[in-house]
Image (cartoon, grey):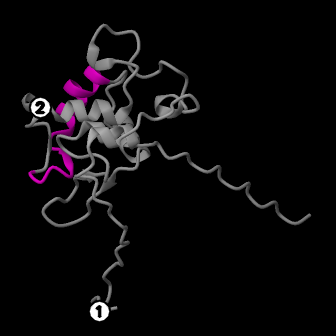
Amino acid sequence: TGLPPGTPAVEVRPYRDYSQVTSDDVEAPDTSSSRPEGGTSAGKEGGGGTSSARSTSDNFPTKLHRILSRSDLMPIISWLPHGRAWKVHRPDAFAAEVIPAYFNHSKYTSFSRQVNGWGFRRIGGGPDQTAYYHELFLRGMPHLVKKMRRPVSQPSPAPALPPP
């Protein structure tokens, strides 16, 4: 395939360009059958506080887009110059200062689980290495997050029983 020996194969995923989709083109999602944020009981994330940043009505991508729109947080987390991916520059500061202001925890690992659970992909090489992208998550286009869905994981098959 033209790769030097020992070079791992790279999975190629199709990328759809949503950068020209307007807010008029986006319909509000039907959330009546959606599971609560994080897949746990309702109100687990964000409830109880008086901060508007912790609003329980906003899903994870909406909160993340709001975080990335804050210029005062750019040294900690920011969009990449092209606006199609974002990166956490200082994970410790992000966990201590940003996560508790928007979510009902302060664990970077929980945040990372949410990132992966919402279908963000990590960039593994090149100048954008360790950044994350999602084709519906673009700078200046918060209306696109309405089209994002948290994928429902398929249950694992039951382990095979040993023969009697």
Mark 2 is surrounded, within 10 Å at the Cα level, by few (under 14), some (14 to 19) or many (20 or more) other residues, namely some
Mark 2: which secondary structure? helix
Could you say where residue 57 lies in the image, as x and y percent from the top left? Answer: 40, 21
Q: Mark 1 points at which residue?
A: 2
User: For the point 27% across and 19% down, which residue is it?
Assistant: 53
Would you identify the image quadrant in which residue 6 lies?
A: bottom left
Residue type at mark 1: give it.
Answer: Gly
User: For the point 16% across and 66% down, which residue is it?
Assistant: 126
Q: In which quarter of the image is the C terminus?
A: bottom right
69 and 126: which is toward the camera: 69
User: For the point 46% across and 35% down, which residue is it?
Assistant: 29
136 and 86: which is toward the camera: 136
Spatial separation of the CA atoms under disc 1 and disc 2: 43 Å
Mark 2 and mark 1 in contact (Cβ < 8 Å)?
no
Q: Residue furthest right?
A: 164
In the image: residue 42, left or right of residue 86: right
Mark 1 is surrounded, within 10 Å at the Cα level, by few (under 14), some (14 to 19) or many (20 or more) other residues, namely few
Does the magenta segment cover residue 25? no
Could you say where residue 4 lies in the image, as x and y percent from the top left? Answer: 27, 89
Magenta-drawn segment: 81-102
Could you say where residue 124 lies in the image, as x and y percent from the top left? Answer: 26, 63
N-term-proximal mark, 1 vs 2: 1
Q: Name the residue under label 2.
A: 73
Mark 1: which secondary structure? loop
Q: Total of numbered circles in the picture?
A: 2
User: For the point 26% across and 43% down, which residue is it?
Assistant: 22
